[in-house]
Image (cartoon, rainbow, N blue to C red):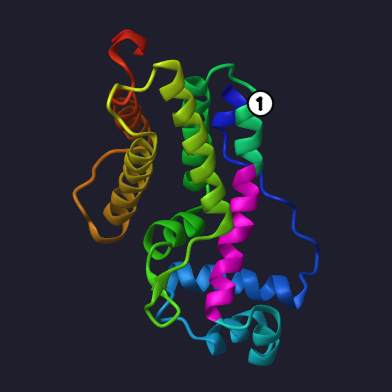
Amino acid sequence: MAALSQPLPSTQEPTELSSHDRILRAARELFAREGYESTTTAAIARAAGTSESQLIKHFSGKEGLLDAIFEAAWTRIGEGIRVALQRPATALAQLRVLSEVLFAGLESDADLRTLMLLEGRRMRRRGQIVVLSRGYLQLVQVLDNLLEALRQSGELRPGVDPQAARSVLIGAFEGLLRDRLLAERVGYPAAYGPRETRAAFAAVLDGLISPADRPPA
């Protein structure tokens, strides 16, 4: 359990990155620092030491870059999720460990935290749709399966729909981290840290559990 609370390991970079990886890294840093809308493909190519034509060749444009950034992140986080789901014996224990994997994964990566929390739900593709990455949708499915297992075992609070419970948990997770990020950036009133974040999330999760199955106070 202790090992899962540590930041997710990052893969070691090769001595020389390919143009594909240089573009991806430059976009990640610029999107997090300047914002998606304010960052141009020209600026990304310049930071990556390559041309816009190479950027278009590899990623088609900014949307393709953002999609690739999120997919790479979810692939890395997904490995931690798979490990987490192999350990605890119950759905509730898996939910608790899974939440810690996600908290640790985002808290250890400032750029990824900024992108996921501030850019991940904005309208893309001429404002018509919100793009949801495959990795994120896989996480949603994992949560739905665990919450459905809790419902079937009678551990989920009666009357609570599993998908509604998933929306509550994701909303609480993102809201707690987003407000901390806003506190760092613009002085938003959210003067709490990792310990308080986890305590608040645990309280939300416990509120979804049937009183008979809650841990003692």
The location of residue 17, given as percent across then percent down, is 76, 70
Residue 215 visible in this rendered orientation of the protein: no
| 159 in relation to 81, above or below | above
Label 1 belongs to which residue?
A: 86
Residue drawn at (54%, 18%) of the image: 90
Q: Residues within 10 Å of mark 1 (few under 14, many from 20)?
A: few
Q: Could you tell me which quadrant the N terminus lies in?
A: top right
Residue 15, image quadrant: bottom right
- Closer to the camera in the image, 57 or 132: 132
Residue 54 image point, x, y percent: 70, 87
Taken as a whole, is the magenta stretch helix, strand or loop? helix
| 120 magenta-colored | no
Magenta segment boundaries in residue numbering: 62-78
Q: Picture coordinates of residue 38 (x, y %)?
A: 40, 81
> Dot 1 lies on which element?
helix
**Residue drawn at (38%, 34%) of the image:** 162
Residue at point 56%, 48% (across, down): 138
Residue 174 point in image, percent of width and height: 36, 47
Going by the picture, which residue comes out furthest to the right?
A: 15
Residue at 75%, 53% (x, y): give it: 12
The image quarter containing residue 208 is top left
Relative to 199, say whether 129 is above or below: below
Q: Give the residue type that dot 1 points to.
A: Gln
Query: Can you say which quadrant of the picture contains the C terminus?
Result: top left
